[in-house]
Amino acid sequence: GLSERLQETFKKLRGHGKLTEDDVNEAMRDVRMALLEADVNFKVVKDFVKKVKERAIGQEVLETLTPAQVVIKIVNEELTALMGGTQSKLNISSVPPTIIMMVGLQGAGKTTTAGKLALSLRKQGKHPLLVADDIYRPAAVKQLEVLGKQLDIPVFSMEAGTDAVTIAKESVPYANSHAADVIIIDTAGRLHINEELMQELTSIKSEVKPHEILLVVDAMTGQDAVNVAESFNGSLGLDGIVMTKMDGDARGGAALSVKAVTGCPIKFVGMGEKLEALEPFYPDRMASRILGMGDVLSLIEKAQDVYDIETAQKMEKKLRKDEFTLDDFLDQLQQVRKMGSFEQILGMLPGMGNIKKQLEGVDVDFNGKEIKHIEAIIRSMTPQERADISVINGSRRKRIAAGSGTRVQDVNKIIKQFAEMKKMMKKMKKMQKSPMGLGRFK
Ligand code: GDP
Ligand code: MG
């Protein structure tokens, strides 16, 4: 699948100080292939690759991240942007009823999605009304009525022979007199886009002036779904897209391309035939699902949030010169604390089992309370003691314990842990060779 392909690609990126053009070009050649194989629109792939390259080449690989992480981060951000950046919600009218018009080709999932949406809106405290406006297939009205009964949601229909525009128009006063605040119009589709279909939909649109025209497309149809969206948007104008059958073995290309091609955001995805199987669409979550490395991404975010680069660089220098002091130790501890335990951090990274084993028996798991203790102890030391623990003899340890309100064995423990931390950091330095390694613990 796409996420496996991308993960393979990123594994090839090795640690250098700076991302070179060759590194990036090679990685992006693979990303390009993976996207094309996933049936992403050709032009979208081209623009995407260009954007990522522009951002990645020459990018400093900061001490806190590995080259692979830098590229993953950029790819993730650009994938998210490609799909619209942030979640797009339904337009809800300030004056009820909100009118939602479902459009799309036959079999895309309009009727099913109308039911799903009604259920979801009712769960949010709304009172939806379903409108049976597919007048061409006798079974269509029946299908919606069965759905309505199942969900206990009212369905508005009119006698056979009534035209679609009249049904849509009449549903509005009906909704008003029945305290419905959302109208969901289930229109008819066709096997293919044609003039007659667009004419009918345009007439309904100008009659009821919907707040939301939702196009339902089948993700399994790949680039056809994108072409359908482009046509509907051109002829009718769309507010949002529902991509159905995302639970099937769709390669994901349609979901990735449709916003870039049409400018129209995906608002929901259908994840199954069940009526609960409708999910709001979150571009960022979709991007990390595609990358298949949600945990790594959240770790990268965290590392960037909490850790300031300058401090990291200063620390590294100190470690190299063996000038790392207890003050620095305290600082590191507080940073680590913000990111979670070492155990957790390592657990989030793929292929880190070995390093985890190496660290077994090294007592470095501190909780918040302990860190307060440690702070008190270190603050009770003189600058000279903080700079060089070898001067801290028995009587000094007693003085420090009294000054910090702790016991001598607590002071001993901290001094021991500090020595272990220094040792561990040396081990961590070796990790940097691994592409996913945490470069910051050097
Ligand atoms: P319409 O012609 O556009 O109204 O399409 P329908 O709502 O009748 O759906 C056509 C078929 O697609 C039905 O068998 C639905 O159960 C199925 N379907 C709709 N949405 C989904 C989905 O998200 N996942 C899956 N697996 N099937 C879906
Ligand atoms: Mg239908």
Image: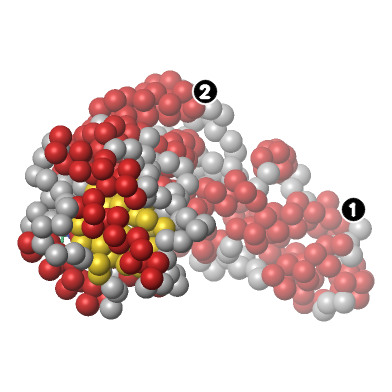
Whole-percent x, y for residue 419 in the image:
69, 59
Which is more foreground, mark 1 or mark 2?
2
Name the residue carrying label 2.
Answer: 58
Relative placement, left or right, of 383 versus 43 is right
Mark 1 near ligand 1 (CB under 8 Å)? no
Residue located beneath label 1 in the image: 384
Point 26% across, 34% down: residue: 235
SS at circle 1: helix
* Percent of width and height locating residue 379: 87, 62
Is the residue marked by circle 2 packed among few (<14), some (14-19), or many (20+) residues within 10 Å?
some
Q: Residue at x 88, y 72 (%)?
A: 404
Sequence order check, earlier mark of 1 and 2: 2
Place of residue 223 in the rendered image (x, y in percent of width and height, measured from the top left): 20, 37
Toward which corner of the image does residue 410 lie, by quadrant?
bottom right
Q: Is residue 141 visible?
A: yes
Give the tally of numbered discs.
2
SS at mark 2? Answer: loop
Q: Amino acid at mark 2?
A: Gly
Question: Residue 60: image x %, image y %?
Answer: 56, 29
Residue at point 75%, 58% (across, down): 330
Relative to 163, is 52 on the left or the right? right
- Badge 1 crowding class, 10 Å Cα cut-off, few under 14, some 14 to 19, many 20 or more, is few
Q: How far separated are the C-alphas under marks 1 and 2?
A: 42 Å
Residue type at the position of mark 1: Gln
In the picture, the quarter occupied by the C terminus is top right
Q: Residue 255: name its quadrant.
A: top left
Determine if residue 241 is in view. no
Q: Residue at x 53, y 27 (%)?
A: 59
**Label ID, residue 272:** none
76 and 233: which one is in front?
Answer: 233
Residues 93 and 37: in front is 93
